[in-house]
Amino acid sequence: MNDTHDDRLAVYEIGYLIVSSVPEEKVAGEVEAIKKIIAKAGSTVIAEEAPYAQDLAYTMRKKMVSGGYEKYDSAYFGWIKFEVGSDKIEALKNSIEAHPSVLRMLLITTVKENTYLSKRAPAIVGAKVGDEGAEEIKDATATVSPEEIDKSIDAMVKEA
Amino acid sequence: MKKQCYFSQHNIKYIDYKDVDIMKKFMNPHGRIINRKRTGVSAKYQRQLATAVKRARFMGLLPYIVR
């Protein structure tokens, strides 16, 4: 009976922590690796946030290949929201969890709309988002002429 | 007068586990979720809040306990 629902598209979000032992300049490469795994499953990315360094609320441990544990007090936190068939999500989750630089990951079902309201922390990669915002601000100032600014200042002075 | 639910008031439909600042408003200094009888949050959003807090704790964005 479940077979009929298995190939349905659903919106998922993966939040991940990349170990702090990865140098900042190499974090982008790790994100690309995660994205490749997601793209391999034939998914379409809806939204994402590039990882940023984050102090963890408690110390986390990650099992090393040699058998011991490594402790982490900080990590790079990022997330990706995407749409994929529900039959592929299990394999996708397992492959991201098995990624050596992923400290922890959380897979949740979510909605297409933006649910994240807070201001975003400055990202290490994905500087494009900030650049676009800067261009928009420039455009806004370009449309206002200096005479109009003078007029509005005069009006404010009169009111005072 | 009865308190209005914060999330209904602010038109927040979904509580995201990444919205740490919002969730902190509903936690006491020990890191515990405050009873909805004290905060006035509706049952629907209190359930969403609890899920979001637990997810944030797992990801290390919020503490499980503050001593």
Image (cartoon, coloured by chain):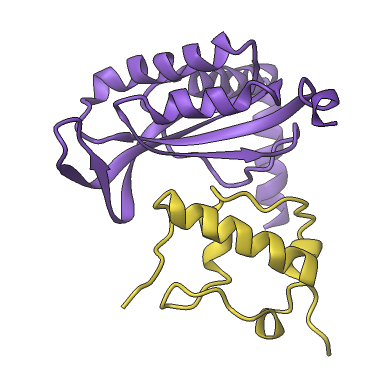
Chain colours: A purple, B yellow
Residue A147 falls left or right of residue B52: right
Q: Could you tell me residue B50's position as x and y percent?
A: 62, 64
Q: Residue at x 74, y 64 (%)?
A: B45
Quadrant of the frame with the N terminus of chain A: top right
Q: Looking at the image, which residue sits at the far front?
A: A1
Q: Is residue A116 visible?
A: yes
Q: Residue at x 40, y 14 (%)?
A: A33
The image quadrant that residue B67 belongs to is bottom left
Q: Is residue A81 visible?
A: no
Image: B8 above or below A52: below
The image quadrant that residue A127 belongs to is top left
Residue B54 falls left or right of residue B38: left
Q: Looking at the image, which residue sits at the far bottom?
A: B1
Quadrant of the frame with the C terminus of chain A: bottom right
Q: Could you tell me residue A6's position as x and y percent?
A: 76, 25
Residue B61 falls left or right of residue A148: left
Q: Residue at x 26, y 42 (%)?
A: A62
Image: A123 above or below B39: above
Residue B27 falls left or right of residue A86: left
Q: Residue at x 68, y 42 (%)?
A: A115
Q: Could you tell me residue A56's position as x and y percent?
A: 32, 51
The image quadrant that residue B30 belongs to is bottom left
Image: A63 above or below A33: below
| Number of marks | 0
Image: A99 above or below A103: above
Q: Could you tell me residue A136's position as x and y percent?
A: 62, 20
Q: Nearer the viewer, residue A115 or B11?
A: A115
Q: Nearer the viewer, residue A146 or A31?
A: A31
